[in-house]
Image (tube, helix red, strand yellow):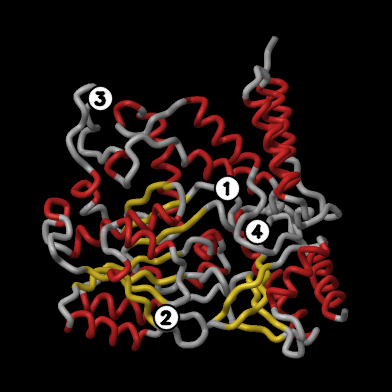
């Protein structure tokens, strides 16, 4: 008996789109009920039926977890994953391609490079070096290691060796930078948080002051992490001014474009990336806005000096030699063994084109939806916060008797839509983001109607 047919059916069940009329939030359940359901899944894991195990796991997760694939989920950047990209991930795993040494997987390496080349061209650096990662956190960690290699003499040999390097980010930047700095051995004191100008954008003059103070105290400024699309409000740092400071100071500039970088696919919105040419490294996530399954990031570098020095090394004797004059994948980033990730990106883009709406058109449509939502909320009397052109809107009710957090929880209990609460410049706000390809005007109608209905209670 061939089990593959039933396994394909299970995959189809897991990929089944959430319908607009379904709850956009999970039901409230007791922890004891969740524990009992988990026990039933684990019982099946101990049995002999893969079908029973996977079926039970799908049901358990779909019932308990926040349905981020729902078209009326306006929360974190976790859209419905592309079925084609999910299939490509399975194909890559089934092929067992191991992209450590080019000579071991020349075909898979060529596919990976072709996919990376397409993304590099979209990011405006066709002559650069780029490679896929597990996400922006890995990309930022890798970029900071490259920055240390370039900024500290003999870093690959000596490590920190008593030196006190510093990395800079804005107060509104993602905390992944802090994690990466600690993982590089800089500790919490090796990360300097720079104030914003009051709109989640890094203050260039505050950056200059921070650099001067740190140099005066014997610290060694190494890198600045600028943000293209903050998580809360989608703010874009002043890249031209930051780039000029980095050039003057000899600093490595990393651009965290984890979700906002998807504008690179758009012929219309790509101009928003003006100033990104100053960056030495750009990190984007294809699982945020474009819709790949979680775990697909990309790091673009302007040049590859430092990669071999920090990530290379002698091959184990049992592996084939390196391709003539070409960097092996193993010398690009932290992992040694790595999957064929580029196939997921190629499949994601192909599926979008086949749908009649390529990734660029999809990005443009979501930006337009974001503008429409901002306009409608303003007309309905909500106070808007931030001015990002990206499709995320922060807002609150100036006459509210409930905090944004309390109101968000009422929305969750209602179940028609899902929005989040966040802190915008130290003030609580409501937050709605649009990154799901199935979200349309009718879903904005449902969101605005739900907000108005609950506000009037």
Answer yes or no: do the residues labelled 2 and 4 have beta carbons within 8 Å? no
Q: CA distance from mark 3 to mark 4?
A: 43 Å
Quarter of the picture containing the C terminus is: bottom right
Q: Secondary structure at mark 3?
A: loop
Q: Earlier in the sequence, mark 2 or mark 4?
A: 2
Q: Quadrant of residue 454?
A: bottom right
Label 1 crowd bin: few (<14), some (14–19), many (20+), radius 10 Å: many
- Secondary element under disc 4, as helix, strand or loop, is helix
Observer-side mark, 1 or 2, equals 2
Q: Earlier in the sequence, mark 2 or mark 3?
A: 2
Label located before the other in sequence (1 or 2): 2
* Horizontal and vertical percent position of residue 405: 68, 74
- Judging by the rendered image, the residue that carries numbered circle 1 is 292
In the image, residue 378 lies at what x, y percent?
A: 74, 84
The numbered mark, 4 or 1, whose residue comes first in the sequence reads 1
**Which residue is under mark 4?**
362
Badge 1 element: loop
Q: Residue at x 40, y 85 (%)?
A: 203
Along the polypeptide, which appears first: circle 3 or circle 4? 3
In the picture, the disc for residue 202 is 2
Q: Which residue is mark 3?
A: 319
Q: Is residue 175 above or below residue 246?
A: above
Q: Nearer the viewer, mark 3 or mark 4?
A: 3
Q: Residue at x 67, y 68 (%)?
A: 420
**Mark 1 and mark 2: span between their CA atoms?**
29 Å
């Amino acid at each position: 008996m061939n089990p593959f047919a039933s396994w394909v059916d299970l995959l189809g069940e897991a990929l089944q789109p959430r319908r607009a009329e379904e709850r956009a939030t999970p039901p409230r359940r007791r922890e004891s009920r969740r524990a009992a359901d988990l026990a039933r899944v684990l019982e099946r894991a101990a049995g002999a039926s893969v079908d029973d195990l996977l079926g039970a796991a799908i049901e358990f997760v779909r019932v308990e977890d926040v349905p981020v694939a729902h078209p009326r989920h306006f929360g974190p950047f976790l859209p419905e994953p592309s079925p084609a990209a999910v299939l490509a991930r399975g194909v890559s795993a089934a092929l067992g391609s191991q992209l450590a040494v080019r000579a071991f997987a020349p075909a898979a390496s060529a596919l990976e490079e072709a996919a990376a080349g397409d993304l590099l061209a979209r990011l405006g650096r066709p002559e650069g070096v780029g490679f896929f990662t597990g996400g922006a956190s890995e990309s930022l960690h890798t970029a900071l290691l490259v920055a240390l290699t370039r900024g500290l003499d003999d870093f690959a040999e000596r490590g920190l060796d008593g030196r006190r390097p510093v990395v800079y980010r804005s107060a509104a930047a993602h905390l992944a930078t802090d994690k990466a700095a600690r993982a590089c051995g800089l500790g919490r004191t090796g990360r300097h948080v720079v104030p914003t100008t009051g709109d989640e954008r890094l203050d260039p003059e505050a950056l200059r002051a921070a650099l001067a103070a740190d140099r005066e105290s014997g610290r060694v400024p190494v890198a600045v992490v600028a943000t293209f699309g903050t998580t809360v409000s989608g703010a874009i740092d002043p890249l031209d001014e930051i780039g000029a400071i980095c050039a003057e100071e000899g600093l490595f500039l990393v651009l965290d474009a984890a979700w906002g970088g998807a504008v690179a696919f758009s012929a219309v919105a790509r101009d928003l990336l003006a100033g990104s040419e100053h960056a030495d490294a750009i990190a984007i996530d294809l699982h945020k806005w474009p819709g790949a399954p979680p775990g697909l990031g990309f790091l673009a570098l302007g040049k590859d000096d430092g990669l071999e020095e920090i990530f290379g090394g002698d091959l184990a004797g049992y592996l084939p030699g390196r391709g003539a004059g070409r960097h092996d994948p193993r010398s690009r980033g932290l992992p040694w063994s790595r999957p064929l990730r580029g196939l997921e990106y190629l499949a994601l883009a192909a599926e979008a084109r086949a749908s009649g709406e390529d990734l660029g058109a999809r990005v443009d449509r979501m930006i337009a939806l974001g503008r429409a939502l901002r306009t409608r909320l303003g007309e309905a009397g909500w106070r808007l916060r931030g001015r990002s052109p990206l499709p995320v809107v922060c807002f609150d009710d100036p006459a509210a008797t409930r905090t944004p957090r309390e109101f968000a929880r009422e929305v969750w209990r209602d179940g028609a839509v899902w929005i989040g609460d966040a802190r915008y410049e130290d003030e609580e706000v409501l937050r709605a983001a649009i990154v799901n390809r199935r979200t349309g005007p009718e879903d904005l109608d449902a969101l605005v109607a739900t907000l108005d209905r609950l506000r009037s209670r």
